[in-house]
Image: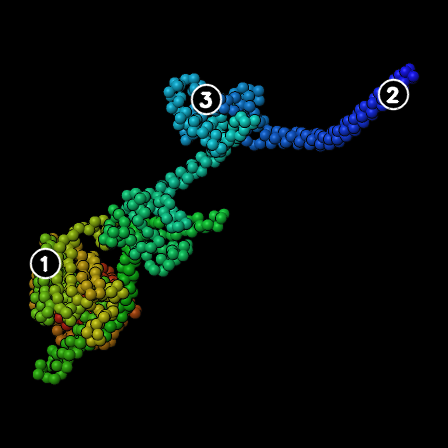
Amino acid sequence: MNLTLYLFFVILAIAVVAVVYAVVLTFRVRKLSNKHEQVEREFNQKQSDLNKISKQLKKTVSKVDSLEAELQLSQLHYNVLFNHSHYMLFTFGLTENGMPDYITEVNDVACSLLGRTREDLLKMTILDVEDIEKPTTTVRLFHRNELVMLSDAEIEYRKTTSDRQLIKQILNNAAVHYERIYVTGSGNRIPVEVRAQKFEVNGAVRVLCSAHDISERQRDQRAVKEGRQRLRDLLNQSPIGAVLYDSECKIDDVNISCLHMFGTPDEESFLRVNLFDNPFITQEVKDRLSRKEAVRFESVFDFDEVRKQGLFVSSRNGKVYFDIMLINLGMDSDFKPRGYLFQIQDITERREAELKLKKKEDQSRQSQKLEAIGSLASGIAHDFNNILTPVMGYAELVLHSTAKEDSLYEYMSEVLQASHRAKDLINQILTFSRKSEQERMRLRISTVIKEVVKLVSSTAPENITFTHYLKAASDGVLANPVQMHQVLMNLCVNAMHAMKENGGPLVIRTDNITIEKDSESGLESGKYLRIDVQDSGCGMDIAVSERIFDPFFTTKAPGEGTGMGLAVVHGIITGMNGSIVVESAPGRGTCFHIMLPVVENATDQVVVKAETVPHGSERVMVVDNEEAILRMMDHILSGLGYTVKALSNPVEALDLLRSNIDDFDLLITDQIMPQMLGSELAEKVLAENPGFPIVISTGFSDKFTPKQASEMGIKGFIMKPIVMRNLAVAIRDALGEGAK
C-alpha cells in the first residue's frame, strides 16, 4: 500500500509535475508564439518600411542620376558659354589682405586674345595681365611689380583710394566697370573694358571679370573726337558764322567767326544774343522762326542801339548787314528734334558795295536819261532855232525901224522878249544835257554867293534868315559866272519855297576837301571846293530825292515851276567836272552838296564891256536852206551896210565862189543843209582860197564844234537864233581889224 501509495503519490507527483511542466511549456510556447508573431509583425513592418525605403532610394537614385545628367549638361552649357563668349572671362578669389588671388578659371577667348596658354594664365593674377602703366581712371588695380616696388605706406595709401574701393564695391554686390590695358604674351597692348562682380562657391568669395576689347570703340571714339575737332576747326576757320542750338533752343556751340561778327568777347557773352527774337528782324521772320521753319533772311543790326538797350556786350559800332539762315536739323531715331543751326554772313561790305554800285548806276542812269533827253533836244534845237531866227531877226528889224511911241514897237518888243525866253529854254535843255558850251573863267565863288544872298534876301519872307559861312581858303573855280549865278539862285529859290510856311535859317557854306583816288564820289582825285546850301524846310522822301534832277519833274503847284531848274543845275555842275548830291528827309530839311575842282588865280568879278552894233560895207554871201532865214539875213545885213548875195543851194554857192571869188569878201553859211554841210562847203572854199573869211551859223551841232571850225581856218561861229548884234560882231571879227 505504501508502495502503491508511494507509487501513487509518485505517479501523482509526476503527473502533477507533468501537468505543471505542460502548463509551463504551454505558457512558454504561447509566449514564444506571441513573440514570434510580434517579431513576424515587426519584420513584416520593417520589410514594408524597407520596401518603401527601397522605393524612395530608387527614386532618389533616379533623381540623383537626373541631377547628375542635368549637372553634366549644365557643366557642358557652362563650358560652352564660358569658352564661347565674345568676352574674356576670368574667375579668381581674394587673398587675406583683399588683393586678387591667382586666376582659377579662364576661357578660350582670353587665351586666344592674350596669346597665352590656360596653364600660364592659371599661374597668374589678374593684375599680371594688366599693363604697368595704368590709364587715369577713378578706380584702378595694382600690378604685382608695383606692390614690390612701392613702400607699405604708399601701397596702403593708394589702396585706400583705389583697390580697396574697388574690392569694397565688389563685395557689396556692386558690378564694377572700369577700363584697363591688357598685355598679350607678345607684348601687345589691348585696351579693355572690365566688368567685375562677386559670386560664392561653398561659402568662398569669388570674382568674375568679363573684359572685352574696346580697341575698335576707342578708334571710333577717336575718329568721332577727331571728326568733331576737324568740324570745330573747320567752323572756326570758316568766314561764315555758325550757332548750334539744341532742341530746346539753347546754344550748344558758336564758332569764332560768329563771335567776331557780333563783337562778343567769348561764348558766355554770346549767350545773351537771341537770334530767334530780337528787335532787328521783322515780325514775319519772327513768326517763321518761332515755328522752327527753315528760313533765310537779311537783318540790319544797329550795334549802337544794341548797347543803348543793353541787349548784349559788343565791340562793334554802327549798322551791320547780316545774311542769316536757320536750318532745322530734323529728327533723330527716336523722333526727337536734333536741334537748329544758324548760318550767318556779314554782308556789310557787299551791301555797301551794292549801294555804291546802285548809286553809280543811278548816276549813270541819270546821265543816260539826260543824254537821251539831250539827244532829243539836240535833234529839235536846230529846227527850233531856225524857226526862232527869222522871228527874232524880223522883230529886231521892226524895232529898229519903228518909233518907241508906236504901238507896233511895244508889240514887237513882246515878240522879241518871248523869243528870247524860247531861246533860253533851248539853252537850258542843252545845258543840263551838256550839249552847250559856255565861256568859263577863273572865278571866286565867294563873290557870287554874296551877290546871290544880297539879291534873294531882299525879296525873301521875314521868317527866313540867310547865313553864309565862307570857310574855304581856296574858292576859285573854272566856271561861267552867269551859270554859277543861275545855280545858286535856283537852289536858294527852291530852299525858300520849301520854308515858306514855317520859315527858318537858310545856310550857305564853303569849305575845301580833298578827294582821294577810288572815292565813291566818282570824281577825279584832287582838291575841291565844297558848297553846301541847306534849308530847314519840309524835306523830301527818297522817291522824290531820286527824281529831283529829272527834267520837267517838279513838286510845285502848276504855274510855280517847270521842273527845269535843278536839271539845269545838274547839267552845269557836271559840265564843270563836278558833282551835286542831295541829302534830305521828310521834316528834316534839305542840303545840296556841290563839289567843284579848285583853280588858282581866280578873279572877284567879270567886267562886261558895252558895245554898239558895228556896221560895214563889204560884200557878203549868205547860204542857208531856209528861205525865211535868207530873207531875214538879207534885210539885217543890208540894214548894217553890207551888200548881200543870198543863196539856198550850197552847190550853187560853191560854183559861184569858184568862178567869182573876188566878188565877195565874206561867206556866211548854215551848217546843216541837205545837199552839202556848211563845213564841207567851207573846206572846199578854203582849199582853193586859203584864208578866205567864213562864218558858220547853226541851230545846233554836237558833231561840229567851234574848236573844229577854228582848226579848219573858219573865222567865226555863231549860234541860232541869230541876234543882230552877235551877227554884226561875228562879221567884224571874221573880217579882222581895219575892215570896212
Instruction: Say which residue label 1 marks.
Output: 469
**Percent of width and height locating residue 680:** 26, 64
Relative to 333, is 691 above or below? Answer: below
Contact check, label 2 and label 3, Cβ < 8 Å: no
**Percent of width and height locating residue 306:** 26, 52
Spatial CA distance of label 2 from label 1 is: 191 Å
Contact check, label 2 and label 1, Cβ < 8 Å: no
Quadrant assignment for the C terminus:
bottom left
Quadrant assignment for the N terminus:
top right
Spatial CA distance of label 2 from label 3 is: 99 Å
The label shown at residue 97 is 3
Residue type, label 3? Asn
Q: Residue furthest front?
A: 1
At 39% from the left edge and 52% from the top edge, which residue is drawn? 326
At 37% from the left edge and 59% from the top edge, which residue is drawn? 287
Indicate which label's residue lies in the foreground, 3 or 1.
Answer: 3
Crowd band around label 1 with a 10 angstrom C-alpha radius: few (<14), some (14–19), many (20+): few
Relative to 218, is 615 above or below? Answer: below
**Percent of width and height locating residue 157:** 38, 24
Crowd band around label 2 with a 10 angstrom C-alpha radius: few (<14), some (14–19), many (20+): some
Q: Secondary structure at mark 1?
A: strand
Spatial CA distance of label 3 from label 1 is: 102 Å
Residue type, label 2? Leu
Residue type, label 1? Tyr
Q: Secondary structure at mark 3?
A: loop
Decide if residue 356 is in sight here. Answer: yes
First in sequence: mark 3 vs mark 1: 3
Indicate which label's residue lies in the foreground, 2 or 1.
Answer: 2
The label shown at residue 460 is none
The label shown at residue 12 is 2
Relative to 281, is 195 above or below? Answer: above
